[in-house]
Amino acid sequence: MKERDICEVTCVDNEKTTRVQQQLEKDTSITEVTKLFKALSDETRLKIAYSLTLEDELCVCDVANIVGATTATASHHLRHLKNLGLTKYRKEGKLVYYSLDDDHVKQLIHIAIAHQEEVASRE
């Protein structure tokens, strides 16, 4: 018999749902967090972000080599991550080095990877 993962009757806890709805209305960061997850949903950008958890900083050329992309493509993805506040860069002569913006980004990537490994081990 197939497991049913939906309620078989409608039963709404009005107090709880009102409280959560009010909190969602007050929290203005939901839209920006959605953009962050959308950016990380791209496999190349996630590979780049993960690479930056393994090394403190990487040159655009190194990033391109790691993910198997052109320098222009890597630069485009890094710029997108920078615009969302996930990475930052510094220029040294003609080279540009990127790093994660702060430890929160590193934690986010590591937690996501650890969670996926845990889910995969259950299967």
Image (spheres, rainbow, N blue to C red):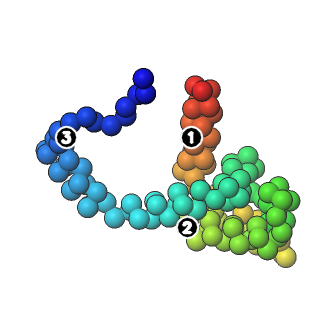
Q: CA distance from mark 1 to mark 3?
A: 34 Å
Q: Position of residue 29 (x, y in %)?
A: 38, 62
Q: Earlier in the sequence, mark 2 or mark 1?
A: 2
Q: Position of residue 88 (x, y in %)?
A: 64, 65
Residue assigned mark 3: 10
* Residue drawn at the location 59% of the way across and 56% of the way down: 41
**For mark 2, does the 10 Å Cα neighbourhood hold few (<14), some (14 to 19), or many (20 or more) residues?**
some
Q: Which mark's residue is nearer the viewer, 1 or 3? A: 3
Most foreground residue, 63 or 73: 73
Residue assigned mark 1: 111
Residue at the outermost left position: 15
Q: Quadrant of the N terminus?
A: top left
Q: Secondary structure at mark 2?
A: loop
Q: Position of residue 2 (x, y in %)?
A: 43, 27
Residue assigned mark 2: 84
**For mark 1, does the 10 Å Cα neighbourhood hold few (<14), some (14 to 19), or many (20 or more) residues?**
few
